[in-house]
Amino acid sequence: QLNELVDKALRNSPDIATAQARLKQSRASLSGAQANAMPKVSGDAAMLKLRSPDTSALGGNSGGGRGPLNLYLAGFDASWEADLFGGTRRAVEAAQAEADASQAQLADAQVQLAAEIVQAYTDLRDQQTRLALVDSSVDIENQALDLTQQRRERGVASQLQLEQVITQAENTQAQRLPLQAAIVESLDQLGLLCGLEPGELDGQLATARALPALPSAVPL
C-alpha cells in the first residue's frame, strides 16, 4: 500500500513532471551539441569522418587554420567544421554537465517526495494505532464506570470513587478528538502529495494497518 502511494505521487507530482521536462530538454541540448561535433551529411550517403590534410610537408601554405572541408561524391555531400578553439567540445561538456545536473535534480525531487509520503503514511498509521488504543481504554473505563455506579448504588463504593472513575473516563474520551483531527490532516496531506483531492484516500486508508516490516538486512 505504501509503495502504491509513492508510485501514484511520482506519477502525479507537478514538481516531478517539471524535473522530467527539464531533464528531457537538457538531454535534447546534449544531443544537439554532440551532433554539431560530427560531420554534416546530406543525400543518401553514410556518415564520414574527414580530416584536414597537412600540406606543409608538401610545400603548401598551412595558413592560419583549417576551414570547412567538403567532400562531394555522387548522391551526397559532407562537410566538417574544424573545431579550432575547442568551442564545440566545450559546448558538449557544458550540455553534458547540464544533463547530469537535471538528472540529479530529478532524483532529488523523487527522493524528497517519497520521503514525505513515507513520513505522512507513518504518522497516519501511528495516529490510527493510538486512536485504537484510546478506544480500547474508553471501553474498559466505561465498563469500570458501570461497575462503580452499581457499587455506589449498593453503598459499597463512595461518591468520591465514582467521581474519580467518571473523571478518568472523560479524560480518556477527550483524547479521541485531537487524534481524529490528526488522522484527517494526515489523510489530506497524503492526498495532496499524491495529486488527489481531499478525501479521495479516505476509503483506502481509513482502516488501521501495521507499518511495513523493515528488511532484516540492508544491502550496502
Image (cartoon, grey):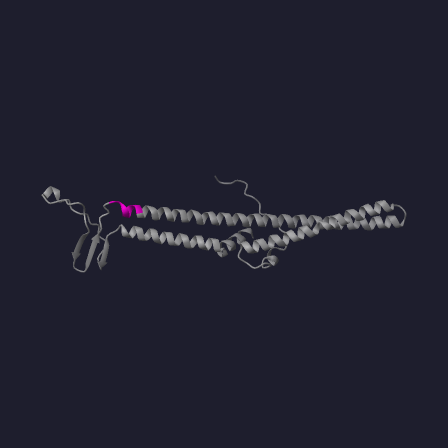
Majority secondary structure of magenta residues:
helix
Please indicate whether residue 34 sits to the left or right of residue 137 in the image.
left
Percent x, y for residue 82?
22, 48
Percent x, y for residue 13?
49, 55
Residue located farthest toward the left when viewing the structure as drawn: 59
Quadrant of residue 59 within the rendered picture: top left
Residue located farthest toward the front when viewing the structure as drawn: 64
Q: Residue at 76% across / 50% down in the picture? A: 170
Q: Residue at 74% across / 48% down in the picture? A: 172
157 or 178: which is nearer to us? Answer: 178
Residue 75 counted in the magenta span: no
144 or 65: which is nearer to us? Answer: 65
31 or 214: which is nearer to us? Answer: 31
Residue located farthest toward the right when viewing the structure as drawn: 155
Q: Residue at 51% across / 54% down in the picture? A: 9
Quadrant of residue 18 within the rendered picture: bottom left
Please indicate whether residue 181 sits to the left or right of residue 195 in the image.
right
Callout count: 0
Percent x, y for residue 158?
87, 45
Please indicate whether residue 68 sits to the left or right of residue 129 in the image.
left
Percent x, y for residue 140?
76, 48
Q: Residue at 58% across / 49% down in the picture? A: 120
Specify start and end residues of the magenta stretch as a single range.
Answer: 85-90
Please indicate whether residue 9 sits to the left or right of residue 155 in the image.
left
